[in-house]
């Protein structure tokens, strides 16, 4: 019972801690309105620890739907944020494996699943994305979004 309660409390705190400090994701945009999607970008996650594509260009002000598919045999996720945020969040995930959480800047997928992130990028710049399943980002499962 106590372990379950602790997991629920941690799950509620992780996303806020990951985005605290005003990293790029929070300064580069916010969750978008699905009715306002201007473009869809398809992304495939694989067990080779890669995103395809791993470099994406979008327009400032546009709402993008990232249609994400896990083509692998193990769980993967896509999380948008600054590299500092992603590294901090990855460390928390290593400390607390198995914690489930959901935020608008992320999608976690079991093998064969598909999901989406709808995000509006409000200004030019670069923002990162990565898989924060322990060990995946460190193995190279990361990419960049260039907002023009």
Image (spheres, grey):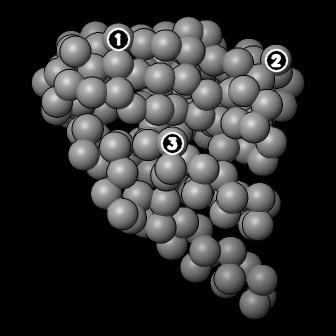
Comparing 84 with 15, the one in front is 84
Disc 1 + disc 2, Cβ < 8 Å: no
The numbered dot on residue 57 is 1
Q: Position of residue 108 (x, y in %)?
A: 61, 39
Q: Quadrant of residue 36?
A: top left
Q: Between label 2 and label 3, give the one nearer the viewer.
A: 3
Q: Earlier in the sequence, mark 1 or mark 2?
A: 2
Note whether residue 79 is visible. Answer: yes
**In the drawing, does residue 45 fall left or right of residue 26?**
right
Q: Position of residue 3 (x, y in %)?
A: 78, 83
The numbered dot on residue 83 is 3
View extreme (right): residue? 73
Q: Position of residue 20 (x, y in %)?
A: 38, 65
Note whether residue 65 is visible. Answer: no
Vertically, is 104 above or below 97?
A: above
Sort mark 2 into few (<14), some (14-19) or many (20+) by Cα contacts within 10 Å: few
State which quarter of the image contains the C terminus: top left
Q: Earlier in the sequence, mark 3 or mark 1?
A: 1
Sort mark 1 into few (<14), some (14-19) or many (20+) by Cα contacts within 10 Å: few
| Label 3 element class | helix
Q: Position of residue 15 (x, y in %)?
A: 48, 61
Q: What's the distance in space between the residues labelled 1 and 2, CA to CA? A: 23 Å
Q: Between label 3 and label 1, give the one nearer the viewer.
A: 3
The numbered dot on residue 99 is none
**In the drawing, does residue 7 fall left or right of residue 30?**
right
Mark 2 sits on what residue? Answer: 48
Comparing 28 with 115, the one in front is 28
């Amino acid at each position: 019972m106590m372990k379950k309660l602790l997991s629920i409390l941690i799950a509620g705190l992780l996303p806020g801690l990951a985005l605290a400090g005003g990293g790029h994701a929070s300064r580069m945009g916010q969750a978008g309105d699905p009715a306002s999607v201007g473009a869809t970008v398809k992304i495939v996650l694989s067990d080779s620890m890669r995103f395809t594509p791993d470099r994406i260009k979008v327009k400032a002000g546009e709402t993008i739907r990232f249609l994400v598919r896990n083509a692998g045999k193990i769980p993967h996720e896509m999380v948008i944020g600054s590299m500092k945020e992603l590294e901090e969040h990855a460390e928390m995930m290593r400390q607390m494996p198995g914690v489930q959480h959901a935020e608008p800047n992320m999608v976690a997928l079991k093998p064969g699943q598909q999901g989406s992130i709808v995000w509006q990028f409000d200004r030019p710049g670069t923002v990162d994305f990565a898989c924060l399943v322990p060990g995946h980002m460190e193995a190279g499962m990361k990419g960049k979004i260039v907002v023009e």
